[in-house]
Amino acid sequence: MSKILLLGSGELGKEFTIAAQRIGQTVIAVDSYENAPAMQVAHGFEVINMLDGEALDRIVAKHQPDFIVPEIEAIRTERFYDYEKQGYTVVPSAKAANFTMNRKAIRDLAAKELGLKTANYRYATSSEQLHKAVEEIGIPCVVKPLMSSSGKGQSTIKSPEDIEKAWNYAVEGSRGDVVEVIVEAFVKFNSEITLLTITQNNNPTLFCAPIGHRQERGDYQESWQPARISDKDLFEAQDMAEKVTEALGGAGLFGVEFFLADDGVYFSELSPRPHDTGMVTLAGTQNFNEFELHLRAILSLPIFEIKLEKAGASAVILASENSSNPTYEGIEKIAGLAKTDFRIFGKPTTRPYRRMAVALTNDSLDTPIEEVIERAKNAAQLVTVK
Ligand SMILES: Nc1ncnc2c1ncn2[C@@H]1O[C@H](COP(=O)(O)OP(=O)(O)OP(=O)(O)O)[C@@H](O)[C@H]1O
Ligand SMILES: NCC(=O)N[C@@H]1O[C@H](COP(=O)([O-])[O-])[C@@H](O)[C@H]1O
Ligand SMILES: [Mg+2]
């Protein structure tokens, strides 16, 4: 049996840990605060600042894990290359974790090295450079810190007056020590998808049915599976996903994000780990959920097939204010609904817009997906977090 050091212990890590526990693996859950969701179900835990390389070195040496599994981006990922040299397995690979924590590394790899279609983009390290970059890219455009996730520090420039604001907002929302932003042309997409892509050690790459999602404030609100997509677009997205995951290396599940526009498919970014929008697979849409697939790929266990069994949707349940010791009202209402389920993550504190729980619905594959999404949204609205 293997020992897994899980770096990041939120809702995604919690489901991954439960999947690992079910097949007898040992998980040590790590995060920056005590009582994080995955810690509540793991064999052991560590509370450290994961951006602190020495703290990371210390717990890796202490636990000597068979697998180091990043669950968030904000980790001193440069250390991962050393761990690989020392013989540790980083999931999916040191390169995958390191490249995706910085938008510049992954975007240059995708657009320049691999030639994938992306939005036009520039970088800027000062507000003067941002003005120039916006002039070149054109308005509207999207500004994001190089190091951030879940929409933090991200804004859309709709007129020249927004540029200064966008710069300040990005610097404030930036994690880590890099003061640099990416400016991307605004893609007028018709929809966006996450393509869960599973790379395996001794077997070919597999894809899940595409997941559609809707974002607000750079964070997902609802996701559904399967997403509506033409065969041509799906084939293109799979081809791009295969190229980028192969370049990053290793075995595991990736969430590859695409925009579907009139002029084709745009690669946006990817997570080298289970994706938040992939929580829809907890609704029983597939024979294996995304956490089980990640685990199987990591452990080199065969995946006989990935079968889409139901249409499903997830809708987030957010907190609205700051509190500790959160309570949940409306659980009995959501519990009473047909073909509906929910997960409460068990986060010890709330803040405005913090994702605390998720509503899940499913139905037969011939049900219009809009109906399934609507039910998930209505279900989520029944629960309030105080
Ligand atoms: N160039 C763009 N054109 C149009 N919309 C965009 C563009 N870039 C981002 N968005 C919108 O903002 C959302 C979040 O962007 P992105 O995925 O790059 O941010 P993130 O902070 O990495 O989010 P997460 O970590 O949750 O994936 C996208 O899903 C999309 O809805
Ligand atoms: N888009 C990335 C994502 O969804 N990550 C998930 O959110 C947690 C952090 O939540 P928190 O900010 O509420 O602590 C992470 O640990 C991970 O599970
Ligand atoms: Mg994203």
Image (tube, grey):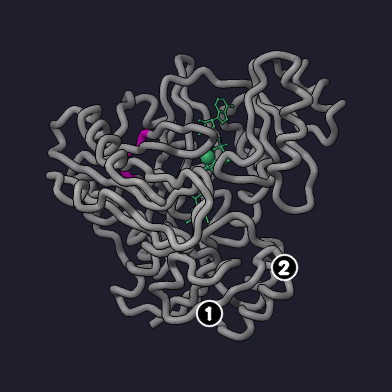
Residue under pointer 2: 52
**Residue in view at x 61 percent, y 32 percent:** 115
**Where residue 301 sits: x, y (%)?**
33, 68
In screen coordinates, is 216 left or right of 248?
left
The amino acid marked with disc number 2 is Asp
Pair 1/2: label in front: 2
Disc 1 element: loop
Provide residue 137's location: percent of width, then percent of height: 71, 18
| Image position of 211 with respect to 118: above or below | below
Magenta-highlighted residues: 208-212
Label placed on residue 308 = none
Horizontal placement of 347 versus 46: left or right? left
* Magenta stretch contains residue 163: no
Badge 2 marks a residue whose secondary structure is: loop
Beta carbon of the mark 1 residue lies under 8 A of ligand 2:
no
Residue at mark 1 to residue at mark 2: CA–CA distance: 19 Å
Residue 240 placed where, x, y %? Answer: 49, 36
Looking at the image, which residue is at 36% across and 37% down? 222
Q: Which mark identifies residue 65?
A: 1
The answer to the question of whether label 1 and label 2 lie on touching residues, with beta carbons closer than 8 A, is no
Residue nearest the viewer, comparing 337 with 49? 337
How many other residues sit within 10 Å of disc 1, few (<14), some (14-19) or many (≥20)? Answer: many
Please identify the dominant SS of the magenta region: loop
Q: Amino acid at mark 1?
A: Pro
Residue at 44%, 65% in the rendered image: 37
Mark found first going from the N terminus, 1 or 2: 2
Crowd tier of the residue under label 2, counting other residues whose Cα lies within 10 Å: few below 14, some 14–19, many 20 or above: few
Question: On the rendered structure, is 306 left or right of 296?
Answer: left
Q: Nearer the viewer, residue 25 or 154?
A: 154
Q: Is residue 11 visible?
A: yes
